[in-house]
Amino acid sequence: MIITKQKPFEKILEMTQPYDKVFIVGCGSCATSCQTGGEKEVAEMAGRLGEKVVGTAVVEEPCDLRLDRRDLKAHREALKEADAVLVLACGSGVQTLADFTGKIVLPGLDTCFIGETERLGRFYDRCRACGDCILDETGGICPITRCAKALLNGPCGGQVEGKCEVGEYKNDCAWVLIWKKLKEQDRLDLFMKFRPPRDHSKKVLLTEVILR
Amino acid sequence: MVAKRPAYSNLVKEIRSGKFVLTGELEPEKTTGLEEILASARAMKPYVVAANVTDNPLSMAFMNSLVPSYIVQREIGLETVYQVTVRDRNRNALISDILAAAHLGIRNVLALSGDHTVLGDNKGAMPVYDLDSAQFVYLLSKMIDEGVDLAGNEIHGKVEMNVGIAANPNADPLEPEVLKIGRKVGLGVDFIQTQTMFDIDLVKEFLREIERFNCPTLVGIFPLKSFGIADFFDKYIPGVHVPKELLEGMRRCKDEPDKEKRKALYDQVNIDFFEPFIKEIRKTTKAAGIHVMAVFYERIFEPLLRTTM
C-alpha cells in the first residue's frame, strides 16, 4: 500500500488561498486505509475550507484514469467550475488527476512510502520500488529500504545491540535482521555472497511499463 | 581470495616485513588552512609509518581529505592513508578522486562507508552510497590490479595503491561484522584498521575471529587528551565505552588547576592504561600494529611508546 500523511492544515490553507473555487478529490483505496483521504477526511477537509469548496468526490483509485473518468462523471459541472483540485491521495493520484482534469492540482498529502500495515495507524516502510528485487537473497528483508545506507553488502559496522546508528538506535539494523533470518534458514552462504554495484541506469530508464 | 598485490606503500611494506607498525591520524577540519595538520604530522612523524587523513568524520563537512593527504606527504615526508567514504560521492566521483590521488602519489586508501549524513553537521544532505564500502574495494581492485574502472573502461597510467578497510570490533552483534569482513577481504584488502578499542578481551576475541581471513590488522586506540573528550567518547561514539576506571582517572585530573600539571596527569592516566594494553596486544595477539588516533594529542606518542615499542 502507498502510505500517505496529511500535510499540516496551515500548508493546505496556504496552497488553496489563491483560489476561490476548489474541488476536493479523495482516494477510496490506499488513502482511505491510511485515514488521510477517505470519505471522512474529505468531508472534514471540506468543512474546514468552507465556502470555497464547490464539490467533493472519493474516487475508488484516483491513480487510475479509467476510475477517475467513471467516478467523476457525476461531478463534471462542479469540476469545470473549480479553479483548482485539492487531492487527498498519493503523488500518483495527484498527477493522474492533473492529467484527467487539466486543472491546477494541489497535493493535500505527502507520500511516504510503499508500506506494510501492522494495523490501522501503524505503517512501516518496506519498498522503494528500485526495479531490481533481491528479496530472495536477503531473507525477505529489503536492504535498499530498511538499511539507512541502502547497503547491498552490510552491515556497515554501526550497529549497537542490533540497532541502527540512524534514528538514535531505535530502528533495527536491516543487515542484522538479514543475518539472523538467513542463519535461521541455514542460508548464511547468501549473507557471505558479494553483491556487485547496481546498474542505476536501469531504474533511471524505467519510467514506464508497456505490456501491450 | 584475489592474488596478493604488490606492496606499493611503506605501510604495507613494513607490515609484510613483519615489523609491528604504528599509524597515526590527522583530521582536516572546517578550515581552509593546513597549519595545524602539518604541525600534527610533523610531531607524529618520528613515531608512525603513516598517518590516516580522515574524510568528513561523523559526517561533518570538512576539508577534502585528498589535499592534506598530498600536502602532508610533500611537505612533511610522512606517508598518508587517504580515507575515502562512499557517503558523499557516487562511483564517478570515486573513480575521479582515486585517479587524482594516484597522480599525487597517494599509496594507501582506506575504503569506508562513512557515518550517515543525518549524524552530521549538514543533516539535510543527500546520502549517496551509490557503492557500499565492499563495492568500493571491488572498484579499487579493478583500478589497481586490472587498470580499468568499474564498467571496464581502460585507465591510462597506473593506480599503485594498497587498500585498507575499517572494522568495528565493538559492533553488536559481532558475528555479522566478522562475516562481512571476510566477504570484503576476499575482494582485495591489504590491511585492516579497527575502530577505537578499550577492551583488551574484545580485541583478543575479535583478532581470533578474523584470523582465518589472513589480513594484517592494526588495532585502533584513542588516547584521551582530556576528560571532556573521554566523556564525549563514552556517550556519543556508537558502541564505544570508555572503561569506568579510565574515565574516573580522567575525571580526577580535570580538577587540577595548573594547566601543565593537569596535562602531565592526563598523560600519566593514558600511559597507565594504554602501556599495558599495547604490551598485551604485542605479546598475546597477531596484530600487525596499532593505529593511534591521538588527534591533536601528539605529545603522548613519545612517553607512550618509550617502553612499548
Image (spheres, coloured by chain):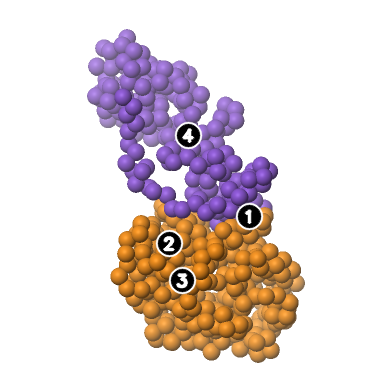
Chain colours: A purple, B orange
Mark 2 and mark 3 lie on one chain; the one further toward the N terminus is: 3
Is residue B36 something that shows in the picture?
no
| B35 displayed left or right of A191 | left
Q: Amino acid at mark 4?
A: Ile
* Front-most of residues A98 and B53: B53
Q: Amino acid at mark 2?
A: Leu
Give the numbered dot on residue A114: 4
Mark 1 and mark 2 lie on one chain; the one further toward the N terminus is: 2
The Cα–Cα distance between marks 1 and 2, rounded to whole angstroms, is 23 Å
Q: Which residue is mark 3?
A: B109
Q: Chain of mark 4?
A: A
What secondary structure is marked by label 1? helix
| Residue contact at pointers 4 and 2, CB within 8 angstroms | no
The Cα–Cα distance between marks 4 and 3, rounded to whole angstroms, is 38 Å
Question: Which image quadrant for residue A107?
Answer: top left
**Residue that sits furthest to the top in the current view:** A74
Q: Which residue is mark 1?
A: B176
Residue B67 screen position, x and y as percent: 38, 75
Q: Which residue is mark 2?
A: B139
Q: Amino acid at mark 1?
A: Pro
Residue A18 screen position, x and y as percent: 27, 30
Q: Amino acid at mark 3?
A: Val
